[in-house]
Image: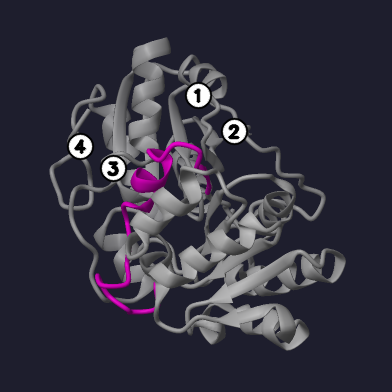
Amino acid sequence: MTLPMGRAMREVFGETVTELANQNRRIVMLDGDLGSSTKGEIFQRAHADRFFQMGIAEQNMLGVAAGMASVGLIPFISTFVAFAVVRPLDQIRVLIAQPRLNVKITAGYAGLLTGRAGKTHQVVDDVSIMRAMPNMVTVSPADDTEAEQVLRWAADYEGPVYVRLVRDATQRLFDPGYTFNFGAAIVLRDGSDVTLISTGAETPRVMDAAEILASRGIQAYVLHVPTIKPLDVSAIVRAAERSDLVVTIEEHTVIGGLGGAVAEALSEHRPTLLRRLGLADVFGQSATNDELMETYGLSANRVADQVATLVTSGRGQPRPAESVSTQG
């Protein structure tokens, strides 16, 4: 059964941070001239005195956010991942992460689905970068419900946080009663033929893939990992114990992302056969969302096909393609 569609995470971002600011005068927003795209403009209309238009000067924007945090304010960043993580990386490292300042890097337009913007605006190695940085928490919500919960949690958390938000509406995985538990992975489905581990907006597609696999007689155990750092190692170990094959799936490079984190955890705590699905050391392209998901093997049908091949072929390597990692 295909999951229903929820709201776009960018709308959740604008509305939730605005509501939080209604309750907390310390919350401010810094925008990199993209408020109409990130929906930071919702905050601007409600709290013009706490909305700071920084222009296309993201290094300066992150530096200013650090200064604001140093005097007790809680800055939220409004821009794309390409301009919130990659361009101002030195400022994040030196001015925010090293002194562990209370800045919320709530970046939109994560991953491949950036509205046909192409490889210049698609950042598929941001998790690799941010989870490797000391003091930096890294969270990737699956849907609008979880995104709202993560933003509320981030406002209360003392320290730097990177929240990975996607542009468009995603399938809704969680009901309104869901509560985000920082640092905890979530079991979404039981099964013993294969263990699927995913994060972010890819998880709803993985759940659809699990349904397709079930129709083929393959029962998948599905684990959602919203908090990539700190990683819920015990949940990953328990998930690996459910089958003798683990497959990670992410809308991100397989180098250093969720798949890398899971590989590190299992190699230390429970050596297990692991295959990683995602972008195999390539940049993205400009195309429709559906076309990109098919091209890089991340649609529900493509995920199901690849996993089924791994299960039925004695867990051998998937056929080499730019969309599938052939690294174990």
User: Rounded to the nearest whole Å, what is the CA distance between mark 1 and mark 3?
Assistant: 17 Å
The answer to whether residue 172 is seen in the rendering is no
Q: Is residue 191 left or right of residue 318?
A: right
Which numbered disc flags the more N-terminal residue, 1 or 2? 2
Query: Mark 1 touching mark 2, by CB under 8 A?
Result: yes
Q: Are marks 1 and 3 in contact (CB under 8 Å)?
A: no
Q: Earlier in the sequence, mark 1 or mark 3?
A: 1
Tell me the CA gap for discs 4 and 2.
Answer: 26 Å
| Three-letter amino acid code of the residue under disc 1 | Ile
Q: Position of residue 255 (x, y in %)?
A: 26, 41
- Foreground of the two, 123 or 18: 18
The residue carrying pointer 4 sits among few (fewer than 14), some (14 to 19) or many (20 or more) residues within 10 Å by Cα, namely: many
Magenta residues (range) = 114-139
Q: Amino acid at mark 4?
A: Pro
Q: Residue tagged by mark 2? A: 185
Can you tell which mark lies on residue 236? 1
Q: Position of residue 306 (x, y in %)?
A: 29, 42
Disc 4 or 3, which lies upstream in sequence? 3
Identify the disc placed on residue 254: 3
In 3D space, how far apart are the residues under numbered discs 1 and 2 (Cα atoms)? 8 Å
Disc with the residue nearer the chain's start (1 vs 4) = 1
Please check the rendered image and state whether residue 36 is part of the magenta-colored stretch, yes or no: no
